[in-house]
Image (tube, coloured by chain):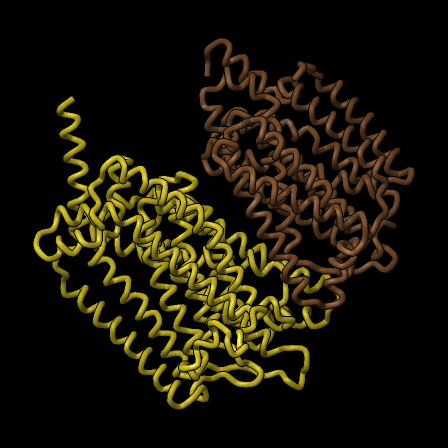
Chain colours: A yellow, B brown
Amino acid sequence: MRGEEQNITTATGRVEKDVLAALGRPGLRYLAGVGLCALLALMLFILWGGLALRGLGLSGKNHPVGWAMLITNFVFWVGIAHSGTLISAVLYLFRARFRTSFNRSAEAMTVFALLVASLFPLIHLGRVWVFYYLLPYPSERLIWPNFRSPLVWDVFAVTTYLIVSLVFFYVGMIPDLAIARRRLPGLRGRTYGLLSLGWQGTVLQWRHYGRLYLFLAAFATPLVASVHSIVSWDFAVSIVPGWHTTIFAPYFVAGAIFSGTAMVITLTIPMRRWLRLEPYITVDHFEAIAKILLFTSLIITYTYLVEHGLSLYGNSPFERDQYLYRALGDYRVLFAIMIVCNSLLPLTMFVRRLRRNLAWLFILGILVNIGMWLERFVIIVASLSHDYDPYAWGTYNFSLVEFGITVGSFGLFFLFFLLFVRLLPVLSMTEIKEHQ
Amino acid sequence: MTAVSLSRGKFFLLQLAVAAALALLGLTGGRGALLVSLVFWTALAQGSVAVVAVTDLTGASWTGPLRSELLAAVTMLPLLAALFLLLLWPSLDLYSWAAAPTAWLNRPFFLTRNLALLAAAATAACLFACRSLRQDPARVRFAVAYLFLFVACQSLVAFDWVMSLAYPWVSSMLGAYFFVEALYAGLALAGMLAFLLDRQRREAEADWPAARRDLGMLLFGFSILWGGLFFAQFLLLWYGNIPEEVQFVVERVSASPSRELCAFFLAACFAVPFLILLSARAKRNAGILGAVSLAVLLGMLAEKLVFVLPAVPVRFGVLLAENALLLAVWLLAVQSRERLLPEVGGKAEDRKTGRQ
């Protein structure tokens, strides 16, 4: 009996040691990565400053394409933010054990992606100093924002989601911060002690923690769906051909989960290797998450079929023309890449050997995100380019400023993530120990 | 439940008799009612098999103790395909497009694709059910195949059988809405079974309380999902306010009895399960699960009626009679599952003799 207890103690000690090893002194390669990402993030802010000073003429936006790359980035990053909560909360509710390998990184990814996403409506405004018109401020002077505008719904949805995601991320981490407090010496230990809010791991604390975590998971799950539904309604409540279609809400939610899952895969494969977490994030876990990727890809493909099919079914020439334009018009190459990345390549996940091949999964994760970015671009730009009136048709070409801001947003996101892996425990040690 | 068990032959004859009775009822002025019953029972039968397929595919144990009862619905799928043929083969005059066919909506293609999919789904369901009951490792592949056909079939039920009644009205979500609703219907059927078999299972199955609680949670979750999908569809039609789109909603909420039926199905499919199953105790109680499930199923029947009613007249007496007949067939299929699905009998025998 004593031997068994000792084994458990050794195993739990090893988990703590392995996970907290990431919080040690960073290497040169890590610092170079942080430096590069910081430079890209700096580029984003400089270019944004330029846009604010010199006006939106620096972007490629025009008549009729008034929503373009910046809004594409907003939708893309909100989408990325989705899978974090999905993986963590939904898989917690379904008691899926493989969540422990991904939940912390996914939750962190949610918070960072939301922070990046929330920049884009501000950048897109141009005159960022009047951003408060988006907020529901008290209306003594009867200047209340239009509540029937989905842009106001967006502010509510994204802010609520950010707050809940932050709370969920932080609450889930408290027991692990207490372990870091115990394990790490000096100022770092004291800082983690402060962050762990006096966690002692008593039975009462665990009971309250369990209830709160379950409640947050149950609350966050419908929230995931509602946030991206509202983002989809930014488009769908209009009567623009290609946008006004009832399937948009579930389509956007599935797309968001799809791209978010791909990003989790893209982030965790190198993280697992660099931090030597192979015993905790196993190939079986990647196989399970690859199945989620396949499942969401099938939903997306179903939606493509339904949207394009029904445009031919009904008797609206505008809808028919719009979907033909997407597939065969000015953006046909982007459309073709999108189909290959989102619908065809993920079918390889039906093959077990490929689901377990981490190199292919990593590449597929990147390709899916390229496909999903292009999907948002095609939806937004093609519909505006080819509206009802041929007189108002036009095409869009992005400017270098918009391109730089897009690249910078990736830099900012990866900067946040790189800082996260060195500052906070990347795996839930308490849950891993519980499963052991 | 009183034990009545029919052999395959007798069950086949019963199905023939029921098909003849329903066809007679349907063709003598009750085609609208038969269409509603068909849409409803196709969702129930395919949905309950789909619930087991999802359970097998995810390696979950939610509906494990009710597997054979849910899979008994497989035996109804050929009857439903036959009814579809009997309803629409003579004439497609229920549909306004029949007078001016299009490339997609024309008689030969409409009948062929729907019959082919119904037959393929029934075959896949049979193949999957046999393997699922044997717990054959290959069941996962058959579950995938069945689920593909289930989604395709329910999408066609939505787009062809229902949406095209109001042609050229289009709602791209209707297909997804129908197959999610069919899964919800399958879970509600499992909830009904949990109530009917509670006493028997409580003694026989150690994990019965956990299965009941899981079922309660799934019903609760699906009530939210259903509510979300309904709202997402309704909001866009209402907000867009385009005459050719919103007319579909206006017709249904501005006249009796559609208006009252709308209120009823919203309450029964969303408000009732959501509010009642918020309580953890209610999720574990078989009586409450049964009552909520019954409400959900009645709500779904009312909803299908709302979809069909303004386009095609429905005689309520005929609708009730048809559904009573189909309910009787389903109950007999559940009772006779050991003879209709031989693997169930084999499994029961194994359990008696202590073999796995």
Looking at the image, which residue sits at the far left?
A: A186
Could you say where residue A126 lies in the image, as x and y percent from the top left?
A: 44, 83
Could you say where residue A225 lies in the image, as x and y percent from the top left?
A: 50, 54
Looking at the image, which residue sits at the far top?
A: B353
Could you say where residue A105 lies in the image, as x and y percent from the top left?
A: 31, 54
Indicate left or right for A53 with B336 as reference.
left
Indicate left or right for B227 with B23 as reference.
left
- Determine whether A414 is above or below B333 in the image: below
Indicate left or right for B55 with A281 as reference.
right
Quadrant of residue B145 in the image? Answer: top right
Q: Residue at x 81, y 53 (%)?
A: B255
Quadrant of residue A124 in the image? Answer: bottom left
Looking at the image, which residue sits at the far bottom?
A: A54
Q: Residue at x 47, y 59 (%)?
A: A256
- Return the residue nearer the eye: A193 or B139: A193
- Determine whether A152 is above or below A278 in the image: below
Quadrant where the image shows the N terminus of chain A: top left
- Return the residue nearer the eye: A317 or B280: B280
Quadrant where the image shows the C terminus of chain A: top left
- Return the residue nearer the eye: A378 or A336: A378
Observer able to see residue A354: no
Indicate left or right for A33 with B180 as reference.
left
Observer able to see residue B7: yes
- Determine whether B340 is above or below B61 in the image: above
- Return the residue nearer the eye: A318 or A194: A194
Could you say where residue A311 lies in the image, as x and y percent from the top left?
A: 68, 64
Q: Residue at x 56, y 65 (%)?
A: A233
Q: Residue at x 39, y 55 (%)?
A: A164
